[in-house]
Image: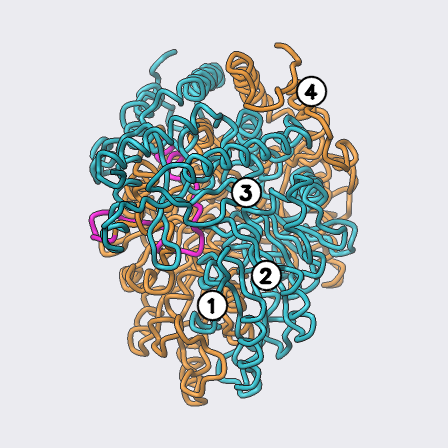
Chain colours: A cyan, B orange
Amino acid sequence: MTDDVLGALGDVPPGEMRAYLHRMADWIADYRETIETRTIVPHIAPGEVAAGTSARLPDHAEPMSRILGDLDTVVMPGVVHWGHPAFLGYFGSTSNGPALLGELAAAALNVSAMTWKTSPAATELEGVVLEWIRELIGLPPAFTGVVYDTASVATLHALAAAREVSGSEIRARGVAGRADVPLHRVYTSDQAHSSVAKAMVVLGLGEENVVRVPTDDAFRLDARALRAAMEADIALGFRPTAVVATIGTTSTASVDPVADIAELCRTNGVWLHVDAAYGGAFAALPEGRWVMRGVEQADSFVVNPHKWLFVPLDFSALFTRHPDALRSVFSLTPEYLRGDATADGTVVNYMDYGIQLGRRFRALKAWMTFRALGRDGLISRIREHCRLASLLADRATQHPGIALAAPPMMAIVCFRFEPAGTSADETDALNEAVAEAVNASGMAYVTHTRLRGVSCVRVGIGNILTTERHVEQVWSVVLSEAQRLGALR
Amino acid sequence: MTDDVLGALGDVPPGEMRAYLHRMADWIADYRETIETRTIVPHIAPGEVAAGTSARLPDHAEPMSRILGDLDTVVMPGVVHWGHPAFLGYFGSTSNGPALLGELAAAALNVSAMTWKTSPAATELEGVVLEWIRELIGLPPAFTGVVYDTASVATLHALAAAREVSGSEIRARGVAGRADVPLHRVYTSDQAHSSVAKAMVVLGLGEENVVRVPTDDAFRLDARALRAAMEADIALGFRPTAVVATIGTTSTASVDPVADIAELCRTNGVWLHVDAAYGGAFAALPEGRWVMRGVEQADSFVVNPHKWLFVPLDFSALFTRHPDALRSVFSLTPEYLRGDATADGTVVNYMDYGIQLGRRFRALKAWMTFRALGRDGLISRIREHCRLASLLADRATQHPGIALAAPPMMAIVCFRFEPAGTSADETDALNEAVAEAVNASGMAYVTHTRLRGVSCVRVGIGNILTTERHVEQVWSVVLSEAQRLGALR
């Protein structure tokens, strides 16, 4: 491989580009093969990565091989290895071979799936994989989908549709300065994702109009409390606009009673959005399908294949029974796209359903992964993650001085060290310290969260590479760090 | 390469994965090498791509080599080749070798750059490339940046900050049902991007509160008309909240008089957002730096490296002199991220500046491209695109029966066939038909747009592979299709 810089114009010469691509293929293969040997969290201080590269844009072209070399010397020392099989933070990692190949192909094509005409393949495969997902998790055919980057963006779109269908021509006229627009309220549990509040802020409805409904001892939204909250608000003149129910909350994977909530929504004419960003995948399992009870009555539903369906970041699927409502908020075709935006109903132009015009070919990686794993492969892996989580929960339950902090659900386990004779604050600090120490060890990765004001250690399993051996490894690091810190005595 | 399906659990076996990666490396190299021989727009009817793949998720794993084979048989027949050097639609395509290598590495790492702790390298390289971009285009050091997917999202964030700093605690309380919140108005030219209206819709401020200010004969916002509009609105009790000035409008790349607009904004305490999604790149050239006049007074500024700085979709950089305002709207740290979200000011957590929590490692592709091309390489390519556009504009000017529809600017040319003795409507139809026919030929790609209600053909040059020969090819297809259709007589 030569070290030629790029000429004054044009791209990397073809022969060289091919060589670099093969070098990158080996780099990726090496990375995947050695990922287990890596220190998960680098020992690095703020500023070290930046210090390894010029603070100023280089004046002249640098040799490609030097830049590729810097991947190892500058970038990798600052990488947290999310794909490591002992990385059990958040929901694990969705990296896998087939999806990675799909990402590479999509990057080479670099199309924008704003309209069918500008990207027939990206548009149609998006429709295909959305149908696959819908059917896999048991959403009725009345739901049609659209892909966004994240569930935060999907929920924002769902609540924008809810705001619109509440009347008052909000798209056109907005909500400010109008006596005829009521105070919209959105209800969600005290365990719900921060994206609900962020959406309300963005939509101009106000963070304080998110009503946090209490949850029961399994962290599920209390439907009676919801009813009471809605009735009290209605009496005060507020307008209940939407409820966001969660299937698989971020901290504990708890599942709200969607059927009960749906009934309340129907009675009061309220939009029901279901945040199944994580838990939707669980519904692919026959034994997990119960989480979908009542979902057929929802108005919108989001599931993130980039959380637990083996599609890498980013890929979030919003489904709704009211695509027209979504389109009525977001369709706005500029002049230079009128020729591309066939509006005769024969094709879908996904730009009509969202804020973004530029849309990557996200469907390709999903299409490749889902085919490479198949329905049974998806199911067996998700089921295995649940088994591993349940194994870890058993360990926690059986160990003196450790208590489960929440009922284990799906592939999420929250547990808490409770050393005798230790104050609540000190216990919190110890639990947080254990999580920090586990991560600092470089051999395992967990998160800590707070449940009802109490700190605990949280594990999420979702990586295709994670096996029982890795869970044992994480557990052993957790125990030894806890012992070292005095959280276990 | 074997055709083994994936086992019941786990990923593609390492040896096979390496082979598939090399197969993909060759596929990408072949694609880049042969892209010029492709039919740009496929001859395909709606539904054909979808018909080539199962409507139902396959029950069992399919062989990886079959899936990779389907890239050629199912996907490629439905791909519009945005990276073809004769694709001169929109702003051209930002595909290039170094960026592609960066995309591949980022896909392999699959980290989420929500906080520094979860992704030190992604966070710090984001800061580094943002600084490079800022300095390259001459934005003062007072501006700090954040990367989003698209300019639509960036502008939404900028206007959310503008809404917040206008007072009234809008984040917390929203704008609905409040007598103390005025009717916010946002001003932008009649040539501005549709994202301004979409942002106003989302923010709950209403599409009809976007005031479309007329433009002069070069499609530049008329500052006197802006002043008059603002004064009239103030007299009526509206609150001018923001002005969105454009550097490089989508249709004609026109440049609003930012300095004049800035003065009006300062006088009236109005947030100035500059949409330089396309035109910001032009400021990298000494001869293009004039477009930045007045920008130092802007409150926020967006430039899309995925439009003309050779960074593939998606990558949009928002800069602001008020990062605290942005953070005051969007910072919301959930419990399970508190441990990661160091708030001592030593590091940046980009999740604090946006709607999305999940954030891809977008900086890597930018870092690799900018180094591989260098400042002079970026400048020489952008300059060459302008030269090619100007060459095309000359051709149009000199050809009887063709008139420029707008002053050529940057690398955008709009021209119009004006056959003698043809009605305005018929002339519009002919111009649209020419653009359609050019695209249907498969040998060239252009867009059509409407300027002051009149249709014309629009060309945008931005692809690293586009040379004079390709521009000649496009021009020759345009002329022959125009002749065939009777647009040229």
Q: Earlier in the sequence, mark 2 or mark 1?
A: 2
- Which numbered disc, 4 or 3, marks the residue closer to the eye? 3
Q: To which residue does mark 3 refer?
A: A410
Question: Are the numbered discs 2 and 1 placed on the same chain, yes or no?
Answer: yes
Whole-Å distance between the Cαs marked 1 and 3?
A: 24 Å
- Which numbered disc, 1 or 3, marks the residue closer to the eye? 3
Q: To which residue does mark 4 refer?
A: B66
The answer for which chain carries disc 2 is A
Q: To which residue does mark 1 refer?
A: A212
Residue A121 point in image, percent of width and height: 68, 37
Identified by mark 4, the residue type is Arg
- Relative to residue B325, is residue B96 drawn left or right? right
Question: Are the numbered discs 2 and 4 placed on the same chain, yes or no?
Answer: no
- Looking at the picture, does residue B435 appear above or below residue B68? below
Q: Nearer the viewer, residue B109 or B23?
A: B109
Identified by mark 3, the residue type is Met
Q: In the rendered structure, which segment of residues is drawn in magenta?
A: B343-370
Mark 3–mark 2 CB contact (< 8 Å): no
* Residue name at image x 45 percent, y 50 percent: A406
- Relative to residue A144, is residue B248 drawn left or right? left
Question: Are the numbered discs 1 and 4 placed on the same chain, yes or no?
Answer: no
Residue A158 is labelled as 2
Q: Nearer the viewer, residue B73 or B236?
A: B73
Q: Disc 3 on helix, strand or loop? A: loop
Q: Disc 1 on helix, strand or loop? A: strand
Residue B24 point in image, percent of width and height: 56, 20
- Which numbered disc, 2 or 1, marks the residue closer to the eye? 1
- Looking at the picture, does residue B175 appear above or below residue A488? below
